[in-house]
Image (cartoon, rainbow, N blue to C red):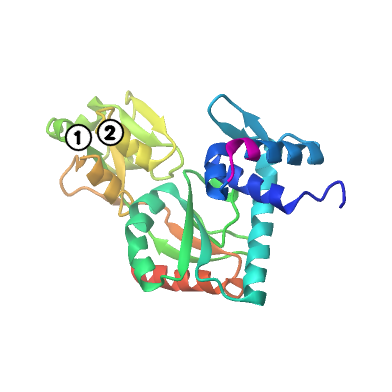
Amino acid sequence: MSARTPSLNWLRVFEAAARTESFARAAAQLNMSAAAVSQQIKALETQLGAQLFRRHAHSVGLTDAGRAYFPVVQQALLSLDTATTSLFGESREQQLFVHAALVFAHGILAPALPAFHDMHPGINPVLTTASNASELGYHFWDMQIIFGDPPTGGDENDPLLAETVYPVATPDIVGQIIRPADLLNWPLIEVTSHRAGWAYTLRELRLSPAGAQFRFTDNSVMACAMASAGAGIALARAPATDLAMRSAGLRPCIDGFSIPGQLQYHLVYPSLSSLRPAARTFRSWLLDYLG
């Protein structure tokens, strides 16, 4: 064995630990002890000559080297599993890796997946999420659901959903908003990753942001949670935030007011011709579901 060719067992342990960000959870998935997971990770790090995890008292986190290595290992293991299945027999269940913007996964995919399972019981979507675009490259994926401009490289994409934006708050705050200018009496919760934010909304309402107080987060699910706690007024982004808004007990602040967003969601994949059968099935189902 080459000094740089790790044991397949070590790689599987590393993949599980990196995916779950926990030696204990990886051990449970692999039917091993946490101590055995830790020993195999240490052996892998020794052979590679690099630290892959930072150990904390009750958690672990990937180092820069581990973060770079993880998608390579995950893709290699998936390729090996897929090739083994195709050459030596069909498995009872096909795994499909979908990486999605957090609010889309929470508000659109999660409620819809039971219907997909009913229609396609032999396919098991593995759903991972990201709150911003930079995180979307972190995992191996068959396809991504991104919010924003479609990719300009070689990837193909299908447009999925646009968004409609409007202010929302708790019933107590809504009851004190008599006219649009009353929005400025409260902190405005801004999602930093969105182009159609409060500046865009206030401009449509012919209000100046001068003197407004802002509170910031990086995703709309958190913005709804903050608004539910009375921290201020958030922007709903229908339909993706409908579930989060209802769960948080939020209501529209201005009857009849909403504006179209400036970006939309896209389903992204390397090419339609290269999609695995499970991914083709998921794509067709998702386009039909949202159509």
Judged by its main secondary structure, the magenta piece is helix
Packing grade of label 2 (10 A; few <14, some 14-19, many >=20) is many
Sooner in the amino-acid sequence: mark 1 or mark 2: 1
Vertical comparison of 253 with 163: above or below: above
Secondary structure type for disc 1:
loop
Q: Quadrant of the C terminus?
A: bottom left
Q: Tell me where residue 111 appears, x and y as whole percent.
A: 32, 57
- The one nearer the camera, 34 or 157, is 34
Vertical comparison of 47 with 75: above or below: above
- The one nearer the camera, 45 or 9, is 9
Left or right for 204, reference 76 = left
Visible in this render: residue 202? no
Q: Tell me where residue 268 appears, x and y as whole percent.
A: 53, 62
Vertical comparison of 182 with 130: above or below: above
Q: Is residue 160 magenta?
A: no
The label on residue 227 is 2
The kind of residue on which mark 2 rests is Ala
Packing grade of label 1 (10 A; few <14, some 14-19, many >=20) is many
Vertical comparison of 228 with 14: above or below: above
Q: Magenta part of the protein: which range?
A: 32-36
The kind of residue on which mark 1 rests is Thr
Secondary structure type for disc 2:
helix
Is disc 1 in contact with disc 2, using a CB cutoff of under 8 Å? yes
* Residue identified by numbered label 1: 170
Tell me what residue is drawn at x 57 percent, y 71 percent: 276
